[in-house]
């Protein structure tokens, strides 16, 4: 498999600063029974930005109960998007393996909810 050329998709600093990534803590996690692919609905506390929810396809490596209290990284400035029976208000970030399983991005140490990633 050939490696993509880094300059093929080069971003400007201005492009990067438009992506608002924040730290949040998972308050609730439960199966999204209406999703086409297995997913959980997550309710995430982003501190001063409030609580937001999303549908995340992270079922390969996580059970809902082990997500509670976990800090995650999410993009919070996408427009709301209809996913199955709910409106997703953020996009949780993770590393996608070759088999498709997602491993969540997080911080090494606890930080305040809503802290911006840069």
Image (cartoon, rainbow, N blue to C red):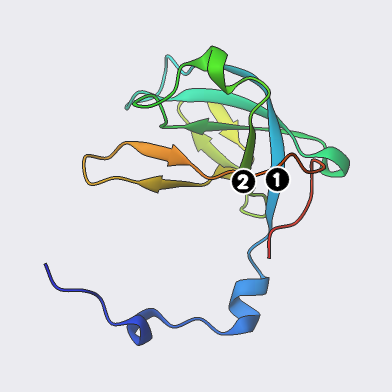
Specify whether 6 is left or right of 106: left
- Residue drawn at x 29%, y 45% is 97
Q: Secondary structure at mark 1?
A: strand
Q: Indicate the position of residue 115 as horizontal and vertical percent values.
A: 79, 51
Whether residue 76 is visible, yes or no, is yes
Q: Are marks 2 and 1 in contact (CB under 8 Å)?
A: yes
The residue carrying mark 2 is 73
Q: How many marks?
A: 2
Viewport quadrant of the C terminus: bottom right
Specify whether 115 is left or right of 32: right
**Quadrant of the rendered structure where residue 17 is?**
bottom right
Q: Nearer the viewer, residue 31 or 36?
A: 31
Q: Is residue 69 depicted above or below 30 in this figure?
A: below
Q: Secondary structure at mark 2?
A: strand
Viewport quadrant of the N terminus: bottom left
The residue carrying mark 1 is 23
Whether residue 85 is visible, yes or no, is no
> Within 10 angstroms of label 2, few (less than 14), some, or many (20 or more) residues?
many
Q: Indicate the position of residue 111 as horizontal and vertical percent values.
A: 78, 43
**Quadrant of the rendered structure where residue 65 is?**
top right
Question: In the rendering, which numbered label is found on residue 7?
Answer: none
């Amino acid at each position: 498999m050939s490696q993509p050329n880094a300059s093929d998709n080069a971003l400007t600093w201005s492009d990067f600063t438009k992506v608002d990534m924040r730290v949040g803590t998972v308050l609730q996690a439960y199966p999204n029974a209406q999703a086409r692919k297995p997913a959980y609905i997550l309710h995430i506390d982003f501190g001063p930005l409030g609580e937001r929810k999303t549908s995340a396809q992270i079922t390969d490596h996580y059970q809902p109960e082990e997500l509670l209290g976990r800090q995650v990284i999410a993009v919070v400035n996408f427009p709301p998007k209809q996913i199955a029976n709910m409106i997703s208000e953020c996009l949780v970030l993770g590393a996608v393996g070759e088999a498709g399983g997602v491993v969540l991005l997080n911080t090494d140490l606890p930080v305040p909810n809503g802290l911006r990633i840069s």
